[in-house]
Amino acid sequence: MNISETIQKSIDLKTNILGNEYLIISIKEAINLIVQSYRDGKKLFFCGNGGSAADAQHLAAELSGRFYFDRPPLHAEALHCNTSFITAVANDYGYDHIFSRLLEASSQPGDILVVLSTSGNSENIINAVQYARSNSVKVISLTGESGGKLSTISDILLNVPSNDTPRIQEAHIMIGHIICEQVEKILFS
């Protein structure tokens, strides 16, 4: 594949998303859920593995710092940023518990967990979602086309219509930026 074909595949996926009325409605629902949670004084947590961890941290920073304009910070935290905690929990309990354990320590009912998983099947993310669901923490999942196991256990599923990991991750950051922009605009306009 050449460079132009790769760019075209990214454009085609975003065009597909633009025409996906269900996905657009689900993005709006995610925005509304996050706005209401912040209005209620709650927190937002993010998690993902690999490139999705980087995207989770990126989106948390957009909300906790700023996006388009100066305004008060919002509580948004990527659950993988404390490497001492991650390595201790992975060593003592297993890697599958790194996110659920920190969520157990930090979350309260009404908070929101945003998970990024191209497959929707990462066990450490599934465990975090199961903890969240059993403790009144709402779950927004960004996945690939099938949604994997997350498709049946998420409050809001934002499943990008693709099976190509790099294209899915590009779409996740676009959707994440849309969410951050709208949340900021609604809360601080």
Image (cartoon, rainbow, N blue to C red):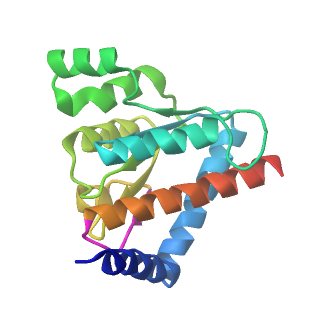
Q: In this view, does 77 lie to the left or right of 101?
A: right
Residue 78 on image: x %, y %: 45, 34
Q: In which quarter of the image is residue 150?
A: bottom left
| Residue 159 located within the stretch drawn in magenta | yes
Q: Residue at x 41, y 62 (%)?
A: 170
Q: Residue at x 50, y 85 (%)?
A: 19
- Asked whether residue 137 is in view, the answer is no
Q: Quadrant of residue 72?
A: top right
Taking depth in this image into account, of 93 and 108 the one nearest to the observer is 93
Residue 152 on image: x %, y %: 30, 60
Residue 96 on image: x %, y %: 19, 33
Total numbered badges shown on the rendered structure? 0
Q: Residue at x 23, y 56 (%)?
A: 149
Taking depth in this image into account, of 185 and 112 the one nearest to the observer is 185
Q: Which residue is the extreme one toward the bottom? A: 19
Q: In this view, does 156 lie to the left or right of 32?
A: left
Q: Which residue is drawn at 39% across and 74% down?
A: 10
- Asked whether residue 80 is in view, the answer is yes
Above or below 122: residue 88: above
Quarter the N terminus occupies: bottom left
Q: Is residue 44 left or right of residue 164?
A: right
Above or below 98: residue 112: below
| Residue 170 located within the stretch drawn in magenta | no
Residue 65 on image: x %, y %: 65, 35
Question: Which region of the structure is painted magenta?
Answer: 156-164
